[in-house]
Image (cartoon, rainbow, N blue to C red):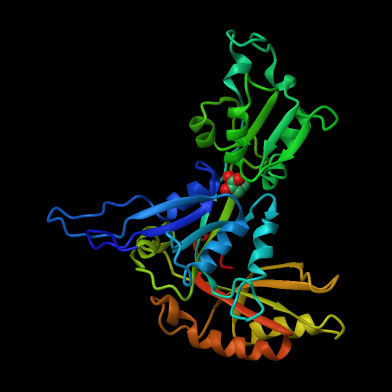
Amino acid sequence: MPRDDGATAINVAYLGPEASFSHQAAIAVFPPRPTSSSSGSSTNSPVTLHPLPTFPNIFSAIQAASSTDDEIQYDYAVVPIENSTNGSVVGVFDLFAQCGLDSSAPYPDIEVCAEYYLPVHHCLFISPDLTSSTSDRGPVPDPVSAIRTLYTHPQVWGQCTRFLSSQFPPAKVERIDVGSTSAAAQLVARESNGGLSAAIGSKLAGEKHKLTCLAENIEDEPGSNTTRFLVVKNRKRKISSDALLSYLSSSPKAKGEVRNKSLITFTISHTKPGALADALAVFKTYSFNLTSIDTRPSRMRNWQYVFFVECEQTADVTDSNDAANFNGDGLKRMLADLERYTESLRYLGTFEDQLLREEGDTT
Ligand SMILES: O=C(O)C(=O)Cc1ccccc1
């Protein structure tokens, strides 16, 4: 929306409430920016981050961005797609299965434009009332063993299996899924006089709600637990790209070689022998390396799947600086050929690979 000073505000959606991991990823990609120079002229588009309650709300907001008169027109959203320990964020995959230029897709205009890797550390939080001598029940002597209910986002249980199985026997402690880790922290903070419940979430969420931290770094892989986020936008919406460009130019990867990844979804015949092998051979023919492959149920017919492939071109590169041209021609030709081996095919976008590879890793 244009402002009085002429700058166009950039609106970014993320899974809220504030202090979720998605919020931290959104801040990293779209940090708060100074908006005007000393002469008073605007230099950067100001960024406003908006917490939304669910992933479907976020996808609907981005899809609607080119066509509604709503007060807020969302330019970007930052959504988690996979975790290095616990794998795919299936709810987000199911939404991407409904994206891509196709009149039957509920989100035809959503495309991926960037990725971000966030190191993720989990803490166990309780209400400070539980350890306070002024509460009705007095300080609980062993708060961990007093906990009867645990709240967190469903992605988190599988990232903290060792800690959870050693501290919280399922027969004694109920695990309740909530919309986000920050919603879990908010719930525990709101329980009157400290119910015997705990939340698992980020240090930031605990600080925001003034919770007591009983354990830090409770994830199974404290040195490497990482969540990958995708940045999405509406392909029909004209946006000033300076906010995204400043992220891309300041990312650690910007100093190294730039590689672009493309995300494609497709379905294939489930009765023709070799249908998947034929489709995958097309990537090889056009020198595209597969960096990721995943499936989700098609929801059209039982035991039929949507394939998600991410790939990067390894040859035929003409212009390594321009994300649009980088593998534009090769990609177009590859997709045209792939169409012959698939039943439905959707291209969801091309973005810079931000994965910092280990030295000596040539893949
Ligand atoms: O619940 C959150 O904080 C989220 O943003 C979703 C999520 C959960 C766990 C790891 C990364 C993202």
- Seen in the image, is 174 located left or right of residue 94? right
Where in the figure is residue 328, as x and y percent of width and height?
49, 84
Where in the figure is residue 99, as x and y percent of width and height?
61, 72
Where in the figure is residue 260, as x and y percent of width and height?
50, 72
Corner quadrant of residue 332: bottom right
**Res 352 visible:** no
Q: Nearer the viewer, residue 271 or 65?
A: 65
Q: Is residue 41 above or below residue 303?
A: above
Q: Nearer the viewer, residue 163 or 49?
A: 49
Q: Residue at x 48, y 74 (%)?
A: 235
Q: Nearer the viewer, residue 60 or 355?
A: 60
Q: Residue at x 85, y 70 (%)?
A: 303
Q: Nearer the viewer, residue 213 or 160?
A: 213
Q: Quadrant of the N terminus?
A: bottom left
Corner quadrant of residue 108: bottom right
Task: Tell which residue pokes out farthest to the left in this image.
Answer: 39
- Seen in the image, is 34 located left or right of residue 123? left
Where in the figure is residue 286, as x and y percent of width and height?
60, 86
Corner quadrant of residue 243: bottom left
Q: Residue at x 61, y 41 (%)?
A: 181
Q: Residue at x 56, y 38 (%)?
A: 202
Q: Is residue 120 above or below residue 331?
A: above
- Seen in the image, is 229 located left or right of residue 283? left
**Res 182 visible:** yes
Badge count: 0
